[in-house]
Amino acid sequence: MFHSSLAGSERVQLPGSRAVGRPDPAERLEITLLLRRKAASAFARAAASLHRHDRTPVRFERREFAEAYGSDPRDAALVASVAEIFGLAVVQHVEARRTIVLSGTVAAAERAFGVELQHFEYPGGTYRGRSGAVALPRELCGVVTAVLGLDNRPAAAPQLRVRPAASAGARAHAPGEVAALYGFRDRSAAGQTIALIELGGGFAPADLRAYFNALGGPVPRVCPFSVDHAANLPSPGGGLAHNAALFDVEVAAAVAPGSRIAVYFAPNTEAGFINAVTTAIHDERLAPGVLSISWGGPESAWTAQARTALDDALQAAALLGVTVCVASGDRGSRDGLSDGHEHVDFPASSPYALACGGTLMRTAGSQVLAETAWADPAPGGSTGGGESACFDLPQWQSGAALTLAGGVARPLERRGVPDVAGNAAPESGYRIRVGGEEVVAGGTGAAAPLWAGLIACVNATREAPLGFVNPALYANREAFRDIVAGDNGGYQATPGWDACTGLGSPAPEVFEPAAEPILVSSERKALLAPR
């Protein structure tokens, strides 16, 4: 059976890694295949229409969306028959998510996809990987758009920073206090579901009960979900990745009292990340109206097929009325890379994400005295931001300027990050509880659940959720708390949009002009059908 290379699937070894041997041919693994979308041209037109702020945004019901834009059952049947020839079996197929999960041995996977797998060691641990492109059996060319899971290197890092115990300066805050400082008082998110994506660690219910009892608020309803066999595994002493889930839950739930928190645990791989996001977005039972992602990595660290797949998932979220809040990164304008160039974090750089940058907040009582871009070079933490190398300039960012750290400005030419900002500096961070002890933490991984919680509160006052809110926010930029001081290494905060804090930090007036989304009827859906 002939094979053809799958564009965008190319891989190289992680820097500093070395091959240490081949995996056991009989070792079993699971591979996620993404199938082409039904009515792909109509989907693209519907997603593109969302970028206009002068029209009412459209919204699909989940079942209606799956029928119109999911995968074709005939494609799934073809994949199953071809996979069987190579000794691979289908263990899951979800039409709405367009995913097929195959199970089989390493030897079978290598034959089916024309790869040679190796075990690699690198400074951060070990992974199973490959070099070069994946090859598809000719029958599947054009049917399968991505093959994920052969390589299980870490895909992302949590955007979380813990304040040293001896740190002095601005005071720390409870999450609800931060919301109140921004003008969001008497909040309720009753009836709303906030989804969180977690690629490791977990939360202990005892910590949550003690934390919210101490705050004097209701203990949130938290629903953990396993994606790709991951689980809620709290480990207070396990480092940032193990505390990120608890941090996200405590911030989101405290900002949005009365909300239900759905936590989707997945392995920290491209396959795990994408499967967690699509599982959350297409969850018909809980139907989250807002999704918070506090994990990410440099655009260049992702395969093109995975970037495209995750961006496509965020387009689906926008059409389903789900706002996706994503941390912009904690490693400044170079996103932690040492090649001397500026980089942005993904998935924050997707034009369908609400990219959340970070600020340092100085307060007195119930007043914000000053707010600047978060930049703390000593421990290496600064708000991420800049210009994407992968995504075009959205029309709602047209006219924005990119101001370099030296004060030189030029027009923004591609997708700019972030869109908005919020308190994130560990110096003015959030008081949370981990393993029975109070910890102060920050990072743009705090700004994402902060914004998610605020949006959930706004959604509770509306007939339908805000959904893809970026165009409306840029059309109402004067309502933001504009941040005009500070930098992130390569860029300066300036009046208007900037690559440190975006439009600025939240205020209740930010959401006032957002139009109510409408459901797309069968008749209207016909207008979006292929011509």
Image (tube, helix red, strand yellow):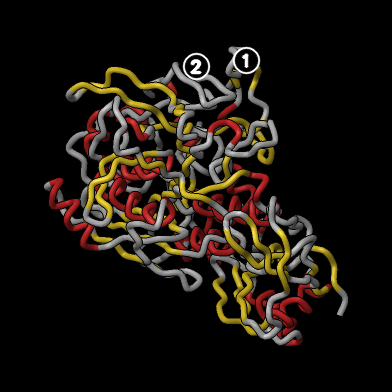
Query: In the rendering, at what x and y percent does residue 315 appear?
Result: 56, 50
Q: Is residue 518 left or right of residue 65?
A: left
Find out whether the residues at labels 1 and 2 contact each other: C-beta distance under 8 Å: yes
Query: In the rendering, at what x and y percent does residue 101 appear?
Result: 60, 75
Please name the residue shown 53% across and 42% down the image: 348
Q: Is residue 172 left or right of residue 36?
A: left
Image quadrant occupied by the N terminus: bottom right
* Mark 2 burial class by Cα count in 10 Å: few <14, some 14-19, many 20+: many
Please name the residue shown 34% across and 63% down the image: 234
- Which three-letter amino acid code belongs to the residue tagged 1? Ala
| Pointer 2 residue | 494
Query: Residue 502 bears which disc, if any?
Result: none
**Secondary structure category for the residue under label 1:** strand
Q: Disc 1 and disc 2: Cα gap in Å?
A: 10 Å
Query: Residue 409 bears which disc, if any?
Result: 1
Query: In the rendering, at what x and y percent does residue 463 appear?
Result: 31, 47
